[in-house]
Structure formats: structure tokens, C-alpha cells
Image (cartoon, coloured by chain):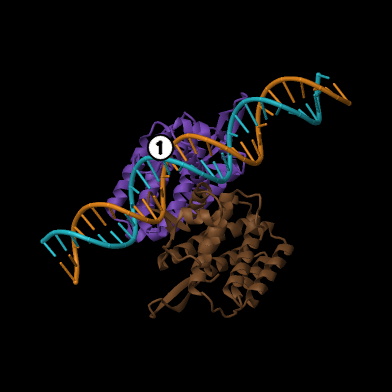
Chain colours: A brown, B purple, C orange, D cyan
Amino acid sequence: MAKGTDDTIAVRISKALADRIISGAIEPGARLRQDHVAEEFNTSHVPVREAFRRLEAQGLAVSEPRRGVRVAAFDLGEVKEVAEMRAALEVLALRHAAPHLTSAILDLAEEATKAGDKSRDVRSWEEANRAFHRLILAPCGMPRLLATIDDLHAASARFLFAAWRSEWEARTDQDHRAILTALRQGNTESAAVTLGRHVQWIGRKPVKTASGATREAFAIVG
Amino acid sequence: MAKGTDDTIAVRISKALADRIISGAIEPGARLRQDHVAEEFNTSHVPVREAFRRLEAQGLAVSEPRRGVRVAAFDLGEVKEVAEMRAALEVLALRHAAPHLTSAILDLAEEATKAGDKSRDVRSWEEANRAFHRLILAPCGMPRLLATIDDLHAASARFLFAAWRSEWEARTDQDHRAILTALRQGNTESAAVTLGRHVQWIGRKPVKTASGATREAFAIVG
DNA sequence: AAAACAGAAATTATCTATAATTTTAGATCG
DNA sequence: CGATCTAAAATTATAGATAATTTCTGTTTT
């Protein structure tokens, strides 16, 4: 994962914070204090403020004027919202990407699927899953669309890590295989329909809250 | 249009610059120089830099590290891309908004359509058009989706103003009327299909370039 | 004991100053 | 005459300092 040493400091900070927010290392609703962050990264708060603006644009943080910025909270409604947006946009991207998909790309996507099935933890499953989606969508050649989808994937990953904090049981992704088969046969329509349904599959899981009670957690598992 | 006096300075600057970029007052590719902007708004460049980050997030500006930021350029490909994204997302929003649409809202949307038909210049037509779309989509209650659609509308307006710099001939929007009729009859599916087609209608218009030659300009007219 | 208040501490937002990089213009060389 | 190098100017990026606002905490009042 290129650490981009030529990035501006603000970009480096925003990437690092995005990683923590997505992984759940920083709780939703937690305040992000510019001086503390600045001190940690050995900079002044100007780049930190710019990093905050980036996080805001990605929907990972919310900022109230004069009251600072906090990690964005989310609920079941937002999980559903992101799932539906992903369905609409990934299907669109796939329809444009399909004519440009080579068997080399599809082979790589199959590799990613296998890697996902073998994953023993959420983190590596998510990485493989994201790789699969990116591989089959990137050839659409629509940069704005791809950027928006990336942000939605970041949100998805956040929901996922919040629900499956540690436990994860390996599972075989039939949808990915069905999509690849359809694409290999040139059946774009079938692949698109499966993809649209696939990313809207919302997993449920009981998790223990801080107060000891159990509530249900939701996440997009696709 | 609330000028938001309680906004932070950075927000005020970004709104002002967004307005100029969308209206075409600043050319695509033109450099945005932080000191000049800072001087104009009587501030230092710290808030200006934050404003730049906001414009970047909206896709109105692009920034290259250490080389500054320039107004985003665009081509026919991006016009098409934005049109397709709008189609996908506005249809999604409409499907969710439909059950919550009241006849009061639909009446307001009809007012907006009439205002658009009466418009003698692009600027007021665009405003009315945007009002129509926002009215029928807002009740979907999906904030992230609506925010993304708003950014796409800003891009659309930019394409529009670039093509129809001054001339504009009044036209009757049959699509808007068809959508309203379908919604009044509770025929969500028909309304959604019409909307999806509507926002993908790309107008063409010959414009004179600086060098005197005429080229064709494209814009989303819906 | 709960609510309201006042003062202190912390934090955000902005400004001024400095360092580093890039662009521009001019001069020199082939 | 055009290309290339060099130095100055302009511009970006970051740092350090200041003002204004919010949050916190302890005390007083009912």
C-alpha cells in the first residue's frame, strides 16, 4: 500500500485518520482535536484542518463551525442508504466496464474472490472484496463515478468493522463466482442484476454493547 | 438565498468561488491563487486553502501538490458521466421519495416547471429546474444521496452555462409535466423511467471559440 | 439536592511570518 | 536564431502566535 511520501502532509494525515475511523479505532461521535492530532503528527494545525475537510468530504467526519469536528455517527438507515447507492452506481459502472473486460482482468478478479474465501479475519476479507469490485469496475473509465464508489466502499468497510469487530467465519462467495461466470459468457445483464442484488445484502449480527446488553449490528457484506 | 453570515469564512469563500466557477466567470483550467483570493476577501490564505479543499471535493477544482489548484476542466465524456450518474441516483431517490410526496409538494413542483418554461435566460431556467428536481427528490430522506445529487447538479449547471453562455430560448418542459402526472396517479415506475431518460438528454449547440471557429458544445438540459 | 451561574481551561478559527518549491524572465552558449 | 542554464520573482505549504468561542468545573442559590 503506497504510503505516498510525496503526498502533502494534509493528505498523509487524512489517510491515517481515515484508516483509524474505518477500522473503528476511533469511535463514532468521538471528537477529533486539531492540536492533539497536530502534535501526534509533528505538524501545525493548518494541515490538520485540511485533512479534516477531506474526511468531511468522504463522509467520515462531520464538522460544526466553532465546535470542531467529530467522527461521523451512523445507523441502520445509513447502512441501507450506502448499500442502495452502491447498487445503483456499481451496476452503472459494470455496464460500461463490461465491454472492456479482458480475461486477464477476470482471472485477477477470481484470484481476489479466492483470497476472500480463504480470509480468516474481517480485515483481509474486506481488502479482497474491495479488490474484486475495483477490478471489474475500473475499466468503465469514468473517474468521477469510480471516486464516488470508492467513498461508498470506505463507508461500507466502516459498517463492517463496527459489526464484526473480531470474529469472522470464512464463507464462500457464490455471488462473485456467478458474476464472473456471467461476464465470461458475455452476459452483462445477468452480471449487473446479480451485482445489484449482491451489494444490497445486509448481514446481521448480535454484538455486545458496552453496557453488557446485546443489540443487533448491521453491515453490507458484499 | 441565505448568505449564511454565521458560516465560517472558508465556507463563505468556497460558496462564492463555486458560484463563479459554475457560472463560467472563471474559465476551466484557470489557476486559483491563494494570495489573490485571500486579498480579495480580506483574509489570510488559511481559510482560502480550506475553501479550495471544499471545491476539490465537489469536483469543481483540481489540486496538484505544490503547484496549486486550478478550475477543473471538463469534456463531453464528463458531461455524459454526470448525466448517467444523475439518472441512476435521481431514479433511486425518486423511488424512495414517491411514497412521501404530498399534493402540496407536487403543486410546488408544478410552479417550478412553469417558472422554468417562462425563463428568458439560462440562469433562471437552471434555478427553476434545480428547484423542481430537489422538490420531488428531497422527501426520500437519504441525506448522503441528496448531497451527492446536489454536487452533480452543480456540475450540470456548469456544463449548461458553458454552452449557453448568453442566448436561451424558452421551451416547454414536457418531461417535467409527464413526471408530475405519473406521480399524481401514483405511477411511480413510469415517473422513474421518464426521469431517468429526462436527465440523460444532452443538448447540443454550436458555439464560437476564441479563435473564431465554431465547435459544438454539450450540456445536460434536464 | 437540583439547577443556575461564573470563572477558568481548553479548543477552534484566524492572522502574521518563514521556509521550500515552482514558475518566469533574462542571459549565455551552441 | 533557438535551446539551455541561471537567478529572481511569485507562489505554495507549513509554523508559530493571537483572538474569540466553547466547554468544563466548582460554587452558590433556591
Q: Is residue B119 above or below residue A81?
A: above
Image-quadrant location for residue D9: top right
Q: Quadrant of the N terminus of chain B?
A: top left
Give the class, few, some or many, for how many residues have Cα within 10 Å of label 1's Cα (few <14, many ≥20): many
- The structure residue drawn at horizontal position 44% and vertical position 48%, both measured from the top left corner, is B150
Image-quadrant location for residue A187: bottom right
Q: Position of residue A218 (x, y in %)?
A: 46, 72
Front-lying residue, A105 or A18: A18
Q: Position of residue A155 (x, y in %)?
A: 50, 62
Left of B4 or right of it: where is A136?
right
Left of B221 or right of it: where is B69?
right
Image-quadrant location for residue B189: bottom left
Q: Position of residue B126 (x, y in %)?
A: 42, 39
Residue on which disc 1 sits: B125
Of the residues shown, which amino acid type is indicated by label 1? Trp
Asked whether residue B190 is in view, the answer is no
Front-lying residue, B23 or B4: B4
- The structure residue drawn at horizontal position 48% and vertical position 39%, both measured from the top left corner, is B48
